[in-house]
Image (cartoon, coloured by chain):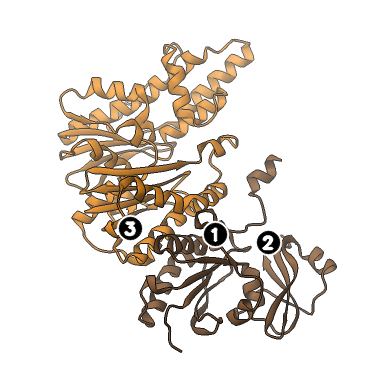
């Protein structure tokens, strides 16, 4: 089965083609990151405009690289949320038009299901598994007992971890996007600054607003005292505390469930320190981490998630699919 | 009227969803003109599918697509332009564009008509046209500006902000522009985004 994935939930226009839920035939990503960097973050209206401009060229390139024609596609899987609504709707309208033009079924897929399934591209999920989803908008632990069955174990009570990375990067003057900038600085430093303890409650919840405020207050105090900030050390200190919370809660969840496998997913899954700590901590269970190329938004993961969604429930959602800025993963649709 | 390889016209830049199947002279075979609820992205594709099905047409039997390219609602116009681009590209059907304001003007009575699309704060997108002998003549380029400016500087007999298009009148005008490269088609916004304006 040939599945076309379409992803436009934020600032990447992406179309990918996969075969039988495993082989990636193409994954074309047109990134707008440079365009938004000068604004210090993604500007929704600019993102939507860029998606319309690039959309057919990306479709064409995806088919070309996959060496197939439109007629070979069996299913279209499009991101229906969560994300920027104006951006989502461009991909959804394009996917619907393509499905209609070639009279093939279409389904809407949850963006986070896509990130989770990025792990299936080069690995093989084994259930029950616990997946830590970490990005600019999400910090949550998901339990899967089977393909495309998501149960939420817990999530952040305030900020997402990626949001905290972005904010800390901004106050340190490192620019946007914050995650990779802090990661790069932290490698050169040691965690020498005091950070708050990881909240050790027996719940699978996270909190990042306290850590974020701590760093901001610390920087303000140092500034008032005229002390120089060692940026690499500050990054390493913050990152260590941020990652430790993720690791601690993930370990708790894996043990409580008796999971066979642990995975990470989302943009922050590209963080090198997190990946290293995952490897150290979960030696007793199978571990999957997504390839770096599939950590950021891409349609490859949407096409794989779409394949499994369709295997579990082969219904054509048809041409009235809508986009949703907020969407609960555990609704399982 | 028989519907053999018709032209599909569509526009989603206003509050109304507009679709029409027309012959090569612009005579209407069938059409849809209905008030939306900010939901063109949900209703557009089902409406196209229903219209073609009603006339026993497959998607590839469309001879040409003419899409309203704005100015108007940003999210609205993107729905129509995205769908038109993908249909035209993937079915290899010729694509043409037309001003969404000209579409509205084409259905007006004879005489100079200001078409106004409200964009809040007394501002709007507007165009000045005249229907003369069943032809649409443009009197001024589409623009963005204040209501006061438009009323003070332009001379017209009536002001409209909606109206069902008349394809035959449009086809007899210079308003329909053939597209050479479908990939390059983008809506006409006439305005930079707020972020870009604030930056300057």
**Chain B colour in the picture:** brown
Between the residue at mark 2 and the residue at mark 1, the CA separation in whole angstroms equals: 34 Å
Q: Relative to A308, is B193 on the left or the right?
A: right
CA neighbours of label 3 inside 10 A, class few (<14), some (14 to 19), many (20+):
some
The mark total stands at: 3
User: Residue A146, percent across and down?
Assistant: 17, 46
Quadrant that contains the N terminus of chain A: bottom left
Q: Marks 1/3: CA distance? A: 21 Å
User: Quadrant of residue B93 in the image?
Assistant: bottom left
Q: Chain A is drawn in which colour?
A: orange
Nearest the eye: A173 or B22: B22
Residue A52: x and y, percent? Answer: 51, 54
Mark nearest the camera among 2 and 3 is 3
Tag 1 residue: B180
Dividing the picture into quarters, in which one does residue B136 lie? bottom right
Secondary structure of residue under mark 2: loop
Residue A128 pos. (x, y %): 16, 40
Q: Report helix, strand or loop for mark 1.
A: loop
């Amino acid at each position: 089965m040939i599945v076309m994935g379409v992803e436009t939930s934020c600032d990447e226009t992406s179309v990918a083609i996969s075969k039988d839920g495993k082989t990636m035939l193409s994954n074309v990503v047109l990134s707008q990151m440079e365009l938004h960097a000068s604004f210090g973050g993604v500007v929704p209206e600019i993102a939507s405009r860029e998606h319309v401009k690039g959309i057919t060229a990306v479709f064409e390139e995806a088919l070309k690289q996959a060496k197939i024609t439109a007629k070979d596609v069996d299913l279209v899987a499009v991101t229906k949320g969560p994300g920027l609504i104006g951006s989502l709707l461009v991909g959804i309208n394009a996917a619907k038009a393509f499905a209609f033009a070639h009279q093939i079924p279409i389904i809407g897929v949850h963006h986070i299901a896509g990130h989770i399934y990025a792990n299936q591209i080069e690995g093989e999920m084994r259930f029950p598994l616990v997946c830590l989803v970490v990005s600019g908008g999400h910090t949550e632990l998901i339990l899967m007992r089977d393909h495309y069955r998501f149960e939420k174990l817990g999530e952040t009570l305030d900020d997402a971890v990626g949001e905290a990375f972005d904010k800390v990067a901004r106050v340190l003057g490192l620019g946007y996007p914050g995650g990779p900038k802090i990661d790069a600085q932290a490698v050169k430093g040691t965690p020498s600054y005091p950070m708050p303890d990881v909240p050790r409650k027996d719940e699978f919840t996270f909190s990042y607003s306290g850590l974020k405020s701590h760093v901001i207050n610390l920087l303000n105090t140092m500034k008032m005292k005229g002390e120089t900030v060692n940026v690499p050390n500050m990054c390493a200190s913050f990152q260590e505390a941020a990652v430790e919370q993720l690791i601690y809660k993930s370990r708790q969840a894996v043990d409580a469930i008796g999971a066979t496998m642990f995975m990470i997913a989302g943009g922050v899954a590209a963080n090198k320190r997190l990946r290293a700590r995952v490897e150290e901590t979960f030696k007793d269970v199978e571990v999957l981490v997504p390839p770096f190329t599939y950590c950021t938004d891409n349609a490859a993961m949407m096409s794989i998630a779409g394949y499994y969604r369709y295997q579990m429930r082969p219904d054509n959602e048809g041409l009235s699919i809508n986009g949703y800025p907020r969407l609960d993963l555990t609704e399982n649709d | 009227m028989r519907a053999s390889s018709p032209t599909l016209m569509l526009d989603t830049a206003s509050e109304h969803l507009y679709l029409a199947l027309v012959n090569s002279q612009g005579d209407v075979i069938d059409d849809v003109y209905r008030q939306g609820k900010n939901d063109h992205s949900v209703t557009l594709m089902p409406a196209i599918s229903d219209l073609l099905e009603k006339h026993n047409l497959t998607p590839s039997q469309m001879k040409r697509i003419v899409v309203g390219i704005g100015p108007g609602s940003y999210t609205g116009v993107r729905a129509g332009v995205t769908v038109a681009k993908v249909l035209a590209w993937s079915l290899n059907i010729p694509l043409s564009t037309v001003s969404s304001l000209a579409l509205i003007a084409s259905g007006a009575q004879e005489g100079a008509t200001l078409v106004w699309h409200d964009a809040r704060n007394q501002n709007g997108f507007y165009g000045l046209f005249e229907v003369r002998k069943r032809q649409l003549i443009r009197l001024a380029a589409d623009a963005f500006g204040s209501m006061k400016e438009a009323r003070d500087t332009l001379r017209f007999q009536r002001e409209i902000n909606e109206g069902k298009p008349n394809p035959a009148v449009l086809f007899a005008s210079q308003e329909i522009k053939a597209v050479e490269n479908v990939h390059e088609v983008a809506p006409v916004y006439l305005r930079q985004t707020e972020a870009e304006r604030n930056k300057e």
